[in-house]
Image: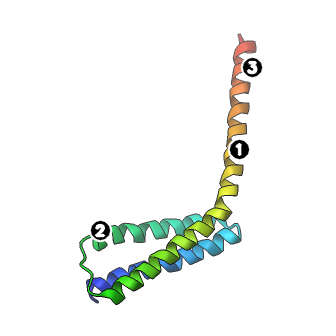
Amino acid sequence: MTPHQHILDTYTSIAVKSGEMLDAAKSSDWVRLIALEQECRALAETLRRVDKEATYPDAAYLQRKAELIQKILADDAEIRKFTEPWMNQLAAYLGNARQQYRLRRAYETDHGS
C-alpha cells in the first residue's frame, strides 16, 4: 500500500466512524458515541503524523481527500445538534449539584461550630 492510499484509507475510516458517531448521537447512545470518538481521535492522531509529511500525487487524490473531509465536518456539525442540548443539560445539572454542595458546606460550617 502506498503512503497516499494509507492516508486516504485513514480518512475513509474516520469518515465511517463519524457516520457511526452520528448514528449514536441520534439514538442518544452516549457511551457508544464516546467510544467511537476515542477511536476517531486515535485515527486522527495517526493521520496528523503521516499526512503532513505527504506530497499529493494528483487532483483526483485531492478531490477524494476533500470529499472525505467535507463528510467528516458535516457529520460533526450534525452530531453537535444532538450533543449540545445534552451537554447543556449536564452542565446545568452539575452546576446545580455544585451549588447544592457549596450551600451544604456553608450551612454545615456555620452551624457546626
Disc 1 to disc 3, C-alpha distance: 22 Å
Residue 96 screen position, x and y as percent: 73, 38
Residue 109 is labelled as none
Query: Of the residues under marks 2 and 3, which one precedes in the sequence?
Result: 2
Which residue appears at 61% of the width and 67% of the height? 79
Vertical relation: 99 (above or below) 93: above
Indicate the secondary structure of the residue bearing disc 2: helix
Which residue appears at 71% of the width and 38% of the height? 97
Q: Nearer the observer, disc 1 or disc 3?
A: 1
Characterize the local packing of mark 2: few (<14), some (14-19) or many (20 or more) Cα atoms within 10 angstroms: few
Residue 88 screen position, x and y as percent: 68, 50
Indicate the secondary structure of the residue bearing disc 1: helix
Q: Nearer the observer, disc 2 or disc 3?
A: 2
Q: Which residue is mark 1?
A: 92
Q: Which residue is mark 3?
A: 107
Query: Of the residues under marks 1 and 3, which one precedes in the sequence?
Result: 1
Which residue appears at 69% of the width and 56% of the height? 86
Vertical relation: 22 (above or below) 99: below
Left of 70 or right of it: where is 93? right
Q: Which residue is mark 2?
A: 49
Vertical relation: 1 (above or below) 27: below
Indicate the secondary structure of the residue bearing disc 3: helix
Which residue appears at 27% of the width and 81% of the height? 56
Give the residue furthest to the front. Answer: 59
Vertical relation: 49 (above or below) 92: below
Characterize the local packing of mark 1: few (<14), some (14-19) or many (20 or more) Cα atoms within 10 angstroms: few
